[in-house]
Image: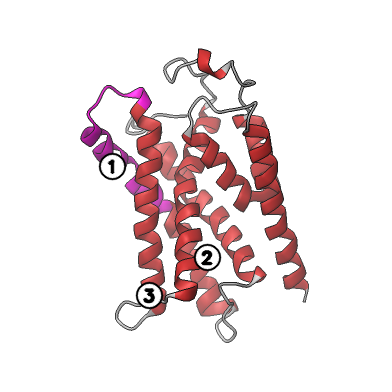
Amino acid sequence: MVLYMISVCFVISGLFCLLVTLFHIYPRHRQNMKIMEAVWSLTSLWATWPGLWAYLKLGKSHPAGMHMKMSSYNMPQHPQWQMVTLSTLHCGAGCTLADLVGELFTSYIPVSIGGSLIAGQWTLDYILALLFGIYFQYAAIRPMETLTRMQVIKKAFKIDFFSLTAWQTGMYGWMAILMFGIFKNSPLSHLSWQFWFMIQIAMYCGFLTSYPANWILIKLGIKKGM
């Protein structure tokens, strides 16, 4: 009962923070980099209040009408830790969207690999995360690079593969603890409040494992800080 109440509280908090973020962004605080509007919305959904705080601290843009005066080339630079944080959240947004789609899909149409539903689920989630992640990276890189579309796609894949894999590793690690440990004898329904609360925690684990990967990618110049 306690876990149920906590789960309801956090999941509803995520939905509330998502709405607050959306109402703040539209129409008066549009982002200079459009894809960040989706990033901040998805971040608020899983990170709840810390995600909303991060948006107000790091992502709040100028009122509508002013953002058009700034291009991707003269966007204000953030301190190193903020650039890494923004890049990590950008990476995680694709993973978040992938898990929402993947988990809801397999709730109605199970996917298995070698007879294993877990293997099928995680493989589907990873593929979706990679596809969404490449799109998010493409949307961020395209306005700032004088490259062909295919070159941008290749660069997006190169960047996102490492940071996304690191994020998914943290997520899968937490979900493995749940499936093979805490809830081994009483699996959670994918449509339960407790399951989605655990997904929120899994996203935090993904952030922690992806942050160092993004720091290294930025340090090596493979990925531009945001």
Q: Residue at the spot x=71%, y=57% of the render? A: 12
Q: Is residue 16 visible?
A: yes
The part of the chain drawn in magenta is 143-166
In terms of secondary structure, where does tag 1 sit? helix
Q: Compute the Cα span from label 2 to label 3.
A: 21 Å
Q: Residue at the spot x=60%, y=59% of the render? A: 201
Q: Compute the Cα span from label 2 to label 1.
A: 26 Å
Residue holding disc 2: 174
User: Sequence order check: which comes first, mark 2 or mark 3?
Assistant: 3
Q: Compute the Cα span from label 1 to label 3.
A: 28 Å
User: Sequence order check: which comes first, mark 1 or mark 3?
Assistant: 3
Look at discs 2 and 1 and give the one toward the viewer: 1
Give the residue type that dot 1 points to.
Lys
The image shows residue 120 at horizontal and vertical percentages of 36, 73
The image shows residue 140 at horizontal and vertical percentages of 40, 32
In terms of secondary structure, where does tag 3 sit? loop
Dot 2 alpha-carbon crowd within 10 angstroms: few under 14, some 14 to 19, many 20 or more? some
The image shows residue 70 at horizontal and vertical percentages of 50, 15
In terms of secondary structure, where does tag 2 sit? helix
- In front of the other: 50 or 143: 143
Residue positioned most to the bottom: 185
Give the residue type that dot 3 points to.
Val
Dot 1 alpha-carbon crowd within 10 angstroms: few under 14, some 14 to 19, many 20 or more? some
